[in-house]
Amino acid sequence: MKFSSNLLIAVMAVYASMAFAQNNADTIFYGGPIVTVNAKNEEVEALAVKDGKIVALGAKSDVIKGWQASTTKIVNLQGNTAMPGLIDPHVHIILTAVGEYIWLDLSNFTTKYDTVATLSNKLKAHLKTLPKGQWLMGFGVDPSRTNPFMAELTADVLDKVSTEVPIFVLNQSGHIAYVNHKAFEIAGVTDSTPNPAGGGVFQKNAQGKLTGVLIEGASYLPFLEKMPPPSDADLLKAVQKTGKMIASKGVTTTTEITVGAMLGLDNEVKLLQGASASKDWPLRVRGYLYGPAIPKDFNAIKPNDGNDRLRFVGIKFVSDGSTQGLTAALNQPYTYPMGSKRRGDLDYKDEDLFGLIKPFFDQGWQLSIHANGDRAVEQTLNNYAKLLAGNTKPETRRLRIEHFTINTPEQVKKAVQLGVVPGFTVGHVNYWGEAFHNHIVGPERASRIAPGASFKKEGGRFTYHSDSPISPVSPLRYISEGVDRLWQKPPREVLGPNERVSVDDAIRAVTINAAYQLMSDDKIGSLEVGKQADLVILDKNPRKTSPEKIANIKVKETWIDGKKQVW
């Protein structure tokens, strides 16, 4: 009996240790509110992670009892807040890297606007640092945020900076650029050069002379082809800096929304693969191949190729220009200048755009179309309706419209019916709200920019994004902007009070809705058992913070797959 009793005790001990080992969490978080963003918007006391996935959430005592072992790492939040890693679903990583870390960054998001003189002085100062033979290249000039309003850099203005060094400055929107006469000379563009195919315009004055203003990407190509490219090492370094900058804003997943648009498809794919494969890369990236950059019969990358750190999920096209740049395609004319008949232009005829997107749709790619103006939004929705004809579950394709800036209530309803998930550049409300309201499109159209409340009312989903480098990456700021909708320029006013959303809805726009838009909501976007352990730790709970102060919440840490990231 003694032997049998000992044997029984030993067997029970083995089974007990096996059971305990099965519930051996790698990490347990507690000591502060944990915002789950699940369907009930619950907050819990503790969260356990094992093998990179969330295995338990709930009361601290239950999670500790069920999952703590001698090897479990304990993370005491010390009153800080944990929530799902933030998601920015529309970023131009490579353009941000080039514009902010290689070229001269002229972006200015303060209320002390630049003038043509201050911009010229910045260019002159940078000119002194350039090696011989280099172009002077800059990014971030914005006439709608320049004093006086809509003051532009022209070839004549840039000639005062230099007549010997070619100059190319990209507008903040990315849809307009400015060059001097030396750049025209090197690019071989003259007063008699026809506008390029693909919607580009070499702007000319009433006398038929080039002004130095280039409209849309096709017009940039003769200049880009002559510029000395940055080295592979400099590009990789700039992309790595950009990744760390994005992560420092609490982001764990983002996109490269136009793979191939700047450096060519092969070059950008390799660049992203190299960056994301490095041990200290702190982000998940979802890639959207830029349609015009894809060679005919291309099949080197198929839908969902890649891994959890870099996956290619969609195809991106651009259907019009910039609203603040007066090139987005509107149904009714801009209100600036007074009496204007300008409505902007579509980049494609309806049937041409459909012919471009249908093969990719049939291959199983998610589609993403940039549409700022209501005429472009309508064109996109009509083409999406044709693609989805007969599909009883259109939401499974999650077709995207980027920006959806100027829109109508009917377009909101149609988008919801088609299962379209729009992404709003909510910085339009903040940085450009006063300009839209008082100058560019007038109060009525401006009030519907970023129509989050309308989408919620119709039962649809929406997301917020930066469109970086068009506006700065900061999902916490997007939450503030979506809730209070205050424009930046004093005296601050609410732009479209009917489109304000709750804090919880704004949080969802940068977490679970954004994950849904990226076809990743089964893995990320909320803190739930079975999902990847992607978290951000904040010094305050945004659900308990006044909306205007949410943008100032400090990001303490980000975690991906239960591992703390370094940025």
Image (cartoon, grey):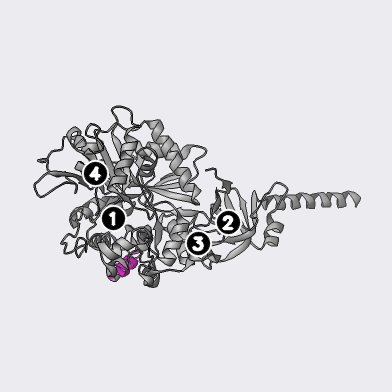
Please say whether residue 536 is visible from this viewpoint.
yes
Distance between the alpha carbons at the discs numbered 1 and 3:
27 Å
Counting labels gives 4
Residue at disc 2, secondary structure: loop
For label 4, the residue is: 178
The region drawn magenta spans 410-418
At label 4, the amino acid type is Tyr
Q: Is tag 2's residue or tag 1's residue first in the polypeptide sequence?
A: 1
The residue singled out by tag 1 in the image is 144
Which class describes the residues within 10 Å of circle 2: few (<14), some (14-19), or many (20+)?
some
Residue behind mark 3: 549
Of residue 149 and residue 205, the one placed in the foreground of this image is 149
Tell me which corner region of the image, top left, top right, bottom left or bottom right, holds residue 77.
bottom right
Where is residue 151 shown, x and y percent of the image? 25, 52
Q: Is residue 115 above or below residue 440?
A: above
Residue drawn at x 41%, y 31% as measured from the top left = 233
The answer to which of marks 3 and 4 sits earlier in the sequence is 4
Q: Horizontally, is 43 left or right of 177 in the view?
A: right
Which residue corresponds to mark 2? 539
Q: Residues within 10 Å of mark 1 (few under 14, many from 20)?
A: many
User: Could you tell me residue 328's position as x and y percent?
Assistant: 24, 57
Please determine whether, in this image, residue 549 is positioned above or below residue 23. Answer: below
Mark 1 and mark 3 lie on one chain; the one further toward the N terminus is: 1
Picture quadrant where residue 465 is located: bottom left
Where residue 389 appears, x then y in whole percent? 27, 63
Element under disc 1: helix
Amino acid on which the number 2 mark rests in the picture: Asp
Amino acid type shown at disc 1: Ser
Which mark lies nearer to you, 2 or 1?
Answer: 1
Magenta stretch: includes residue 415: yes
Left or right? Give the position of 188 relative to 322.
Answer: left
Q: Residues within 10 Å of mark 3 (few under 14, many from 20)?
A: few
